[in-house]
Amino acid sequence: MDWIIQKAVELGACQIIPMATRRAVVKLDEKKAEAKVRRWNAIAASAAKQSGRMLVPEVTEVVGFSKACSMAGQLDCGLIPYELAKGMGETRAILEKLRPGMQVAVLIGPEGGFDTDEIKEARDAGILPITLGRRILRTETAGMATLSILMFYLERV
């Protein structure tokens, strides 16, 4: 998670919200969670400084999947890379509608992937499943690949 936060900040994430999913392996108790969030925010601050960002993204406490969907649904666009999503053309069409300044949420799944009920819940919240291609990517790779793509579409030059 430390590495994911560092790279997400470098790639332009404005906020990082760790999310508990059905297949998530790590479960934090409240005391450990507070210490982790402090550590994660220190990592975000360091990464922002290193990458020349004026904004230091906040890393929040872990939220449940339903809350994450609700939060994502309030932004301009919500995306959920999903290994069973089909259609690179459909994904391209979704991404080509993105414009600089839009607020985009990305929900990245755990190592075991999203549960089908979670995908349905995300869709019901207006979050769009996208494909990242034929390969099944590790959690940290899927996040960085998605952020790299979004940086291309969303950053003003």
Image (spheres, helix red, strand yellow):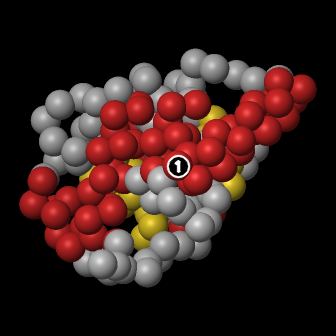
Identity of the residue furthest to the top in this view: 25
Name the residue beneath numbered marker 1: 50
Task: Decide if residue 23 is on the left or right side of residue 94.
Answer: right
Q: Can residue 26 be spotted in the picture? A: yes
**Quarter of the figure with residue 150:** bottom left
> Seen in the image, is 84 located left or right of residue 73?
left
- Circle 1: residue type: Gln
**Residue 151: percent from the left, percent from the top?**
33, 62
Q: Position of residue 9 (x, y in %)?
A: 51, 51
Q: Where is 139 relative to 70, above or below?
A: above
78 is higher (above) or lower (below) than 37: below
The quadrant of the rendering that contains the C terminus is bottom left
The percent position of residue 10, horizontal first and vertical second, equals 46, 50
Q: Using the image as rendered, state which of residue 97 and residue 32 is in the foreground.
A: 32
Residue 106 visible, this orientation: no
Say which quadrant the N terminus sits in: top right
Residue at 16% over, 42% down: 133
Which residue is pictured at 16% across the width and 63% down the height? 92
Q: Residue at x 51, y 31 (%)?
A: 3
Q: Position of residue 20 (x, y in %)?
A: 63, 35
Q: In the image, is residue 23 above or below residue 73?
A: above
Which structural element holds mark 1?
Answer: helix
- Vertical placement of 36 versus 73: above or below? above
